[in-house]
Image: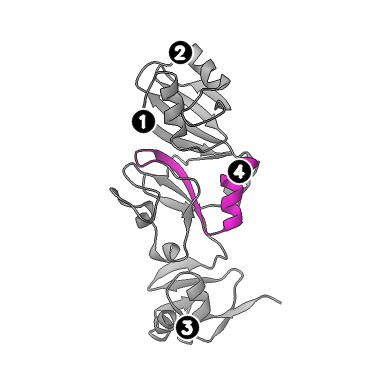
């Protein structure tokens, strides 16, 4: 038998406030469920394929949230920011209320693909080096990148405060100053530090791929979307 839950608790679980706040939304006839107005907070509904609206905004019941975002520059991947706005300000409040977290942070000036979720196991699988989910970055360098530089990145460079050398999984040249670099880890400022270790400097950095999941061309900076089943499959090793 399909699991059922009262509407008040359904809305609370989806991040629409306390049970009291959700009850008020329902009683005030601000909620429809599967296309029908419902003003009974205690009405029971099956969670599978459940769709509802709050003040005309459409939502789908989701046990967990899995999102991608095209992170713009000058945003911080933190709830407590110091100098710049947070990427969480780009999300609807109910998702923030559900304590959604970004999976691996990008620097304030770094753009590109970032994943967010409120599923702890999913976050661990994607972010842990043990699961070997590669990340690909488009790196624009101040100076031209030579063939020997590419070989150095593949062989490994020594970073300050690191005991072992750090190597890229793959490196390819896009143009004289632009390379694509694939990494398995996500150490602090890793790309910038690796480029600096060979005497160059990163001018612009963008993450374009996680696993086999590429940043969609039609997803503009600051925009987000739900991950599809195909997207989730592309994140598996």
Q: Quadrant of the N terminus?
A: bottom right
Return the mark for residue 38: 3
Q: CA distance from mark 2 to mark 1?
A: 18 Å
Q: Position of residue 2 (x, y in %)?
A: 67, 75
**What residue is drawn where x is 46% and y is 80%?**
19
**What residue is drawn where x is 42% and y is 19%?**
175
- Residue at the disc numbered 4: 234
**What residue is drawn where x is 55% and y is 36%?**
185
The answer to which image quadrant residue 177 occupies is top left
Mark 2 Cα shell of 10 Å, populated few (<14), some (14-19), many (≥20) = few
- Residue at the disc numbered 2: 146
SS label for mark 3: loop
**Mark whose residue sits in front, 3 or 4:** 4
- First reached walking from the N terminus: tag 1 or tag 4: 1
SS label for mark 2: loop
Return the mark for residue 204: 1
Mark 4 Cα shell of 10 Å, populated few (<14), some (14-19), many (≥20) = some
- First reached walking from the N terminus: tag 3 or tag 2: 3
């Amino acid at each position: 038998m399909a699991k059922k839950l009262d509407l008040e608790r359904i809305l609370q679980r989806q991040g629409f406030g306390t049970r009291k706040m959700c009850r008020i939304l329902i009683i005030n006839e601000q909620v429809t469920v599967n296309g029908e107005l419902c003003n009974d907070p205690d009405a029971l509904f099956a969670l599978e394929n459940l769709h509802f609206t709050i003040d005309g905004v459409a939502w789908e019941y989701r046990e967990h949230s899995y999102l991608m975002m095209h992170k713009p520059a000058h945003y911080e991947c933190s709830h407590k920011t110091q100098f710049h706005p947070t990427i969480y300000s780009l999300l609807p409040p109910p998702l923030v209320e559900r304590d959604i977290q970004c999976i691996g942070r990008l620097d304030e000036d770094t753009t590109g693909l970032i994943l967010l979720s409120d599923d702890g196991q999913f976050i661990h699988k994607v972010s842990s080096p043990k699961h070997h989910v590669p990340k690909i970055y488009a790196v624009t360098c101040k100076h031209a990148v030579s063939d020997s530089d590419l070989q150095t990145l593949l062989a490994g460079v020594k970073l300050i405060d690191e005991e072992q050398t750090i190597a890229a999984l793959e490196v390819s040249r896009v143009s004289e100053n632009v390379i694509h670099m694939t990494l398995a880890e996500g150490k602090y400022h890793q790309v910038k530090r690796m480029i600096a270790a060979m005497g160059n400097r990163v001018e612009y950095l963008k993450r374009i791929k996680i696993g086999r999941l590429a940043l969609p061309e039609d997803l503009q900076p600051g925009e987000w979307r739900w991950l599809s089943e195909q997207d989730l499959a592309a994140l598996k090793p």
